[in-house]
Image (spheres, rainbow, N blue to C red):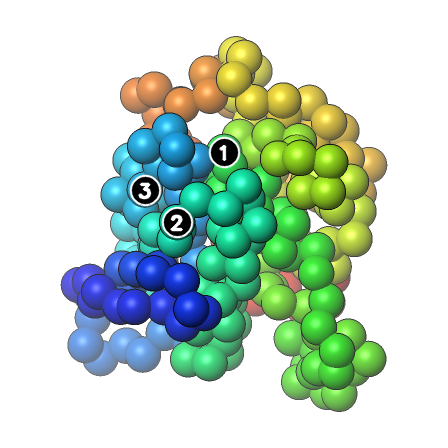
Amino acid sequence: MTDDILLPGGRDVRGRLDRVDDDSTAPDACVVACPPHPQHRGHRGDERLRAVADGLTTRGLDCLRFDYGDWDEGYGERADVRHAVDWARERYDRVGLFGFSFGGTLSLLVASETHEPGRRADTGEPADTAWPVDAVSALAPTARIDATLDAAAALPAINCPTQVVYGTRDDTADWEPVVAAAEDADATTVELAADHFFVGQADTVADHVAGWLPDAIDRVGP
């Protein structure tokens, strides 16, 4: 089942909530899925996002796929991700984040941010800083959007379970610095024999991402 929604934040950001197809179940977790670059036809209907969403809903998690607002050099789009996460936080106990390509870069950037004051996601106890998501998975993220939107530099600051999935034949994204930073941070890395678009491998991507996120979201602590 799906629901269409207008996300908050002052920009025209539209989302689609893929819901667990079981009226007897009220999921307490949701994954926000961020599409690839909007100037390269990236949108919420991307094949990889839909495959991951299907994999999540069969595993008992809802998934919010959304389209970015008007192009803003990555900064407005990062704000769109934040607002999508905030929307999910208001409705679910636990929130995960997933993105492909440009969306993967934004996912890592937003996952690295803190908010003060807050409560710990794992215990609900007051904390000096609150982390926006409980787990993050990035598929084929590029290292940076510009000098200040640098996912490789931000990755060590992420304080939740982190997964980076990449293709060894990817000659589109500058993924090597992200993978190196992920390995240094003891994050989970998944290597696939694939190009940037994972042609013919959407189900394989879904198996890795949707197979990892539910347990990662449930994990206590960083």
Residue 59 as seen in the image, left or right of residue 151 = left
Locate the C terminus by quadrant: bottom right
Q: Which mark is residue 79?
A: none
Amino acid carrying label 1: it is Ser
Sequence-first tag of 2 and 3: 3
Q: Identify the residue at horizontal 30%, vertical 68% (top origin).
A: 6
Secondary structure of the residue carrying tag 1 is loop
Marks 3 and 1: in contact by CB < 8 Å? Answer: no
Q: Is residue 28 above or below residue 176?
A: below
Q: Which residue is mark 3?
A: 43
Q: Residues within 10 Å of mark 3 (few under 14, many from 20)?
A: some
Q: Is residue 106 above or below residue 87?
A: above
Residue 220 as seen in the image, left or right of residue 203 = right
**Foreground mark, 2 or 3?**
2
Residue 219 as seen in the image, left or right of residue 147 = left
Q: Quadrant of residue 143?
A: top right
Locate the N terminus by quadrant: bottom left
